[in-house]
Amino acid sequence: MNHTLINNHLHISFPDEFQFLTRDELQELYRSDNKDMWGIRDKAHKILLTVFHHKSSGFMVKVFGNPKEIAEQNERKLAAFYRDYGYERKEFFSSQINGKNAYGFRYVYTVQGIEQICESVVTFYKDTCYTFYYYTRPDLWEDNKPIYEEILRSVQFQD
């Protein structure tokens, strides 16, 4: 099992089969120069897991620090971005990550002829918003879900 620290506050563990994604790989995948992202991939299981983190002022967290609002906003952006890729939202859901309220959604889309299913989950720790993205193929969803859930259960926040 591998262990790492993201943003100096989020501990996460994941199976040895996963490999870290480089900054260049992440920027290419997301077509973004955002430096506040981390990711891993298990090529054999066709799993991609990324974590974005964004620090906000205390005021902004109080005003906009609701995981549901952020998740719904993210969903609207993704629906627009993937509209030419057969985007379809499956469902919204409430959750918890390390005892913190979380909210997320699942969606499918097709890129380069390959259908993908994704789960996006938003939570806050202090003044930072963390968004987890889990990608796999629909036919592997059930088999890979326990691996993803184990990784989420490993999450620990620290000061």
Image (spheres, rainbow, N blue to C red):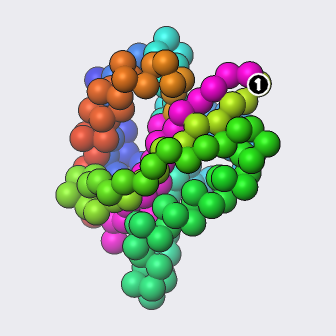
Residue 96: percent from the left, percent from the top? 26, 54
Q: Identify residue for label 1.
A: 112
Q: How many marks?
A: 1
Q: Residue furthest left?
A: 99
Judge whether residue 89 can be spotted in this image. Answer: yes
- Identify the residue at image location x=38%, y=58%: 103
- Identify the residue at image location x=79%, y=42%: 84
Q: Main secondary structure of the magenta part?
A: strand
Q: Is residue 60 left or right of residue 2?
A: right
Badge 1 density bin: few <14, some 14–19, many ≥20, Cα 10 Å: few
Q: Is residue 12 above or below residue 76?
A: above
Q: Secondary structure at mark 1?
A: loop
Q: Is residue 2 left or right of residue 110?
A: left
Q: Nearer the viewer, residue 52 or 11?
A: 52
Tell me which segment is drawn in magenta.
Answer: 113-134
Residue 85: percent from the left, percent from the top? 74, 38
Q: Residue furthest top?
A: 44
Q: Is residue 50 above or below residue 100?
A: above
Quadrant in which residue 23 is drawn: top right
Residue 15: percent from the left, percent from the top? 34, 22
Q: Is residue 90 left or right of residue 17?
A: right
Residue 116 lies in magenta, yes or no?
Answer: yes
Q: What amino acid is at disc 1? A: Gln
- Identify the residue at image location x=35%, y=28%: 145
Q: Quadrant of the N terminus?
A: top left
Q: Quadrant of the C terminus?
A: bottom left
Residue 51: percent from the left, percent from the top? 48, 47
Judge whether residue 13 can be spotted in this image. Answer: no
Q: Is residue 96 above or below residue 20?
A: below
